[in-house]
Image: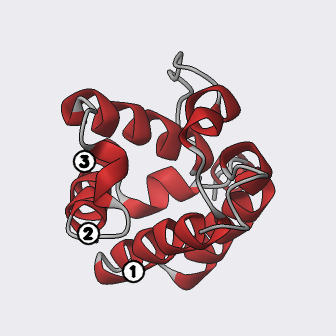
Amino acid sequence: MTVTEEVTPTSHYERIGGASSVKAAVELFYDKVLADPELAGYFVHVDMVEQRRHLALMLTVVLGGPNEYAGRGLAEAHQPLGIPAAHYAKVGEHLAATLTELGVPADIIGDVRTVLGQVQDQVVSADAGAGA
């Protein structure tokens, strides 16, 4: 038995299968989001190839994979969109459903939900909740 094998814990990123699994999750996730009439409008004028690439890089970081994300911060990218909390929650539901559908272990999905909770204030617009 080698001690170094036990010292380095496997990241969530490695546990789910690395880059190919993240890419599959992003593809399925955006299929769900773009089919959702409440959310699709946010992406009408968005380059979806680039959007998918950005999310794959961000999800990789969230899952403990290599950090190669160099895009805008969450608040800078999302605050101008006026996203209400209800829409943010729907996006989180689509992500959790995607990960569940792909067989991602429950503890990893729980950790992703925790991160979503931690960054919600950066994405949700403070003034969007009242009228939405």
Q: Secondary structure at mark 1?
A: helix
The residue at 31%/53% (across/down) is 41
Answer yes or no: do the residues labelled 1 and 2 have beta carbons within 8 Å? yes
Label 2 – label 3 distance at C-alpha: 19 Å
Tell me the crowding category of disc 3: few under 14, some 14 to 19, or many 20 or more residues within 10 angstroms, Cα based: few
> Quick one: label 2 or label 3, which is nearer the N terminus?
3
Q: Which residue is mark 1?
A: 97
Front of the two marks 1 and 2: 2
- The tally of labels here is 3
The residue at 58%/53% (across/down) is 83
Q: Nearer the viewer, residue 125 or 55?
A: 125
Q: Is residue 129 left or right of residue 63?
A: right
Residue 31: where, in percent of width, then height? 20, 62
Instruction: Work out whether residue 23 can be spotted.
Output: yes
Instruction: Work out whether residue 18 can be spotted.
Output: no
> Quick one: label 1 or label 2, which is nearer the N terminus?
2
Image vertical order of residue 52 relative to residue 112, above or below? above
Image vertical order of residue 87 relative to residue 121, above or below? below
The residue at 60%/33% (across/down) is 80
> Quick one: label 1 or label 3, which is nearer the N terminus?
3
Q: Nearer the viewer, residue 86 or 31?
A: 86
Circle 2: residue type: Lys
Q: Quadrant of residue 54?
A: top left
Label 1 – label 2 distance at C-alpha: 9 Å
Quadrant for the C terminus, please.
Answer: bottom right
Label annotation for residue 32: 2
Image vertical order of residue 48 relative to residue 39, above or below? above
Q: Which residue is mark 3?
A: 20
